[in-house]
Amino acid sequence: MKYQILFIAWITGLFSGIEIYAQNCHATLYGTVTDAETKDPVPYAEVFLPQTGQGKITDEKGRFVFTELCEGKYTVTCQHIGCSHQSKNINLVGEMSLNFQLTHETFDLGEVVIMEKAIAPKAAQAERSLENAALDAAKGQTLGDMLKKLPGVTTLNTGGTISKPVIRGMHSNRVLMLNNGVRQEGQQWGADHAPEIDPYIAGKVSVVYGANSVRYGADAIGGVVVVEPDPLRTKKGTGGEVQLAGFSNGRSGAFSGLLNFNTGGKIPLAGRVQGTLRRGGNLRAPDYYLENTGVSEANYAATLGLQRERWQSEVFFSQFFTRNSIFKGSHIGNLTDLQNAIDRGRPLDDGSFSYELGRPQQRVAHYLLKVKNQLKTGSAGKLTLQYARQFNRREEFDAHKRFNEVPSNFDNPEMMFEITTHTIDAAWEHKSWRHFTGSIGAQLVGQVNTTDRGGLIPDFNSRTAGIFWIERWRKYPLPLEFEAGVRYDARWLDVGNRGRDVIDMQLNFNNFSGTLGAIYKVNDEFDIRLHAGSAWRAPGVNELFSDGVHHGSASYEKGRSDLKAEQAVTTSLTFDFDNERNFSASLSLYRNFIRDFIYLQPQQQPVLTIRGAFPSFAYEQTDARLTGLDWNANWKPIPQLTLTSSASLLRARNQADGEWINLMPADRFRQGVRWEFGKDRKRKQWQESYAGVSAVHVFEQTRAPENQDFAPPPPAFTLFDFEAGTSLQFGNNKANIGLAVQNIFNTAYRDYLNRLRYYSDEMGRNVSVRLKMTF
Amino acid sequence: MKNLKFLTTLLILSTFLFTACDKDDDGMDNDQELITTVQLTFTDGAGATLVFNVKDLDGDGGNPPVADEIKLKASTAYTLSVKFLDESDASHTHDITEEVQEESGEHLVCFTANGAMTAPAATDTDGNGKPLGLTNTLTTGNAGSGSLIVSLKHEPDKSAAAPCSTGETDAEVTFPVVIE
C-alpha cells in the first residue's frame, strides 16, 4: 500500500493537563499505526521522539514500542516515506498506548485521526461480547435470547417472552446484571422474573464468566452481564438512529429511536435520548397458538453529559415498563391438574391469534437514575463517584379472582412487590506506577422491599457495604500479566412481615472475596489465561422465608431462615488463538465449587391442602461442583466464507450424594456457515452483504436427578436458523437491512429450561426483518 | 478544587432528592378468598341428615386438612349436597357455595369413588344445562370401606370427554368412607 502523504494528528485530551511530580524513567510508549479506512496495519512507518533522538520503524503489524523512557513531555511524530512531518506534544506518564489511524486521501489533508486510548486490558477470566453487526442482528429479541448465541450462555424461560440469562448453569441471584454501570436491583430472585433492561439501550453487551465479585460486588458467583450504551457524542452536532424490527411469530414489532447531540463550544454538553416500543400478540407453536402470550413494552432513557479536561459528569435516567401475558394453559390448581396437562401433551385449547393481553399477566416497571462524576487527580489517577437510585414495581395478575368475576381492569394485582435501591460507588483508579495499574473503592447499597399484595416474600430492609482493591501488573513487552484483588462485604438484612405472619428477624452476613489471574502471551496470536475467583452470596429472601404454593409449578416451597451464605471458588483456563487473518478459536475450561449451594430439595411427603396435594420442596444446602467447557471457533478457508463452531458442555454434581443437580442446561453444539459478498465492489451502496445458515443441536438432559421432576427432561432437538443482511450507504446516511428465519423447519420441541415445558411446545418458525437507519 | 466541591455538592444533593422513599406499608391486602372447609350433607329418604367435613382452617402449610369419616347405611338412597366455606375468620363464616352457584357455568364439582363407595351423580345443572354437582344423588351398595374424592374445578371444559380432567382445581379433598 502506498502512502503519498504525511500522517499526523493530535491526541484527544485525556492526558493533557497532567503535571509531573517526579522523574520516573520506566515509562513505556507503544501503539500501532493503522490505515483509518481499511483498518490494515501500516508497516515501515517511522515514529520519532526528537527529544531523545529515538526512532522506531513499525513492524509488519504496524506496531512500535519505546521502553524505559523518562516521564515527561515529548513530541511524537509519525511519518511515512515521501512525506513531510508534523509533530505533536504529549505528556508521557507510566504506560501509554498511542494508536495512529491514518487516512490517505490524496487531496484532502483535513481529516487526520490519531486515537490515544487507555489500554483496554484483556480480562484474566473468560469474557465475550456482542457488539456492532452481531448485536444489531440480535436486536428485537429479549436480552436473554440475544445472549444465547454466546458459548456458555443459555436461558431460563417462562414461555416465549420471559427469559433470563443462564451463565454456565447459574442464574437469577447468582448472575449480576450491570446496566450502564449500575448493579441492576429488581426482583431477580424469581425464575420467572426477567431482567428489566431495554436491550436497545446497549451499544455492547458482554458476559463475564465465573465469579467476579471483587469488581462488581457480592452475589456474582456465576458471572456478570454487562450492558453498556455507546459513549456520548464527542463531535459537535447531532446524529441518531432509528431501528425497526418485525417478527412473524406473534406478529410482533419493535421500534427504537435515539438521538445524540453535542453542543460544542466552551462547555460542550453532550446528550442522548432514546426510546423503544415493543408489541406482540399470541405466539404460535408449530401445531397451535399459545393463548395469551402477548407482550407490550415501552422504555425510554435520557443522558446528559459534560466533559472537561479534568472532570466529567453524567446524569442518566431510564424507565422500563413491560406487560407480559402468561400462557393460559399453564395456569393450574394442583398436582392433579399438572398431571392432566402433562398427560394431554398439548394445551386444552388450540387458541387463536390475538393482541389482547389477558390474565395471567405480569407488569413490571423499573426506573433508574444515575449520577456519575469523574475527576482526574493530578497525574496519579482518576476518581469516580456514582450514585444511583432504582425503583422496581412488580405486579402479577392471576387468571381470575376465585369465585368472583374476572375484573375487567388491572387495578388490583394479586401480587405486588416494590423495591427501592440506593447505590453509592466510589472508586479511585490509579495510573501505571512501577508497572502496576489498579483501583481501590467502596460501595454502599441500601434497599427497601415492600410486598404489598400476596405474601410470598416478606418486607425487608437491607444494607450492604463493601470495599475492594484490585491491581494488575504488566511490564511491556514481557509476555506475562498478573491480576489480583480482594474485597470485603457486609450485609445486614432486617425482615419484617410476610403477609399476616410476623417474622421480625435480623440477619448479618459478611465475607471476603478475591480474584487472582494470569495472562501469558505465547506469541502475538496465542494467549493463555488462568483465573481463580472466590465469591459469596447471602441467601435471598425467597430462599430464607418463602412459604407457600408456587402456582404454575404446582409446588409447595418452604424457605429456611438458618441458611448460610454460599461460598464459591471458580477456576478457569482459557486458550485464545487469533491470527487476525482467517482463524480464531477460544477454548475455556472451568471448574466451579460452591460450598453450601442453595437448592430446592424435593420432600418425601407432599403437602396436603384443601386444594389437594402439592409436591413439597424445601431449600437445602449442599456442596456443588460444576465442570464444563465452552468452545468457539471461526475459520475462513477463503475470504468470503466463514465457518463457525461453538459448543457448551456442563456437568453439575451434588457432592454430598453424588447426584446430578437439576435444571442445568443440556450440552449443545452450534455450527454455522456464512458467505460475505465482498466489501469493495464498485457499487459502493451495497456493502457488508452476507447470508448464513446455522444449526444448533441441544442434547436431551440425561444428567438430571431421577424421579424429582414431574416429567422427564424433553428429548434432544436440532434447530436451523437463517440470517442475511446488507448495508446501504446514501450520502451521510446509512441503512442496515436484515432478514432472519428462526426455526426454519418449524420443528416442534421443548426446552428443559423452560418452566412451561410441561404444558406446550416452544415457539415455531419465526421470520423477522429489521432495518436500522443511521443519520 | 472548585470542581470537586461542585461535584460533591451535586452528589449529596442528588442523594437527598431521591432518598425520601422509606415507606411504611399500610395498604397490606392479602385477603384472597380461601376455601377452608368442604362440607357434605347426606339426606336419606326419611329426611335424616348426616354432615361430614374436611377442614384446613390454617390454610396451606401448617397443619394438614382434617377429614371426617363418612358413615352411611348400606343399600340406601341419599341426596348429597356440597358446600364450600371459608371459616378462617372464626367470627364470620363466608359461604363460597353461593359464588360457585352464581358462576355455575365456570364450575364443576367432581367425584371419584373408591372401594365400597358409590359415585354420586349430579342432579343440578348450570345455566347452559350442563352438570354442576352441588346437589347429587347416590344409592349405596353393600357394606365395606372406601373413599370419596371431592374436587371443585374452575373453568373446566364441560364439553370435553372427561370434563373432570380439565380446568383448574380450586379444592380437592379425600374423605374416608365406611358403609355399614
Image: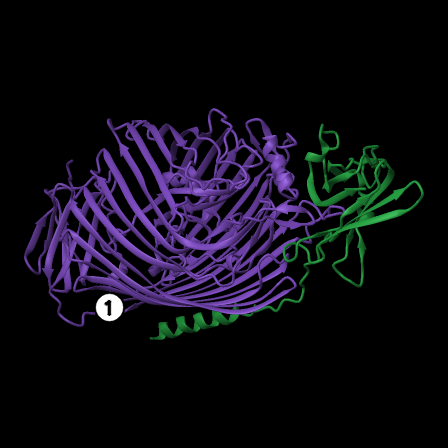
Chain colours: A purple, B green
Residue A235 visible: no
**Residue located 46% across and 43% down the image:** A663
- Quadrant for the C terminus of chain A in the image: top left
Q: Position of residue A309 (x, y in %)?
A: 30, 64
Front residue of this view, candidates A656 and A340: A656
Q: Position of residue A115 (x, y in %)?
A: 25, 51
- Quadrant for the N terminus of chain A in the image: top left
Which residue is labeled 1 in the image? A380
In the displayed structure image, the side of residue A129 where residue A636 appears, left or right: left
Direction top: furthest residue: A745
In the displayed structure image, the side of residue A272 where residue B161 appears, left or right: right
Q: Position of residue A737 (x, y in %)?
A: 43, 33
**Residue located 20% across and 59% down the image:** A473
In the displayed structure image, the side of residue A123 where residue A718 appears, left or right: right
Q: Is residue A437 above or below residue A412?
A: below
Front residue of this view, candidates A392 and A344: A344
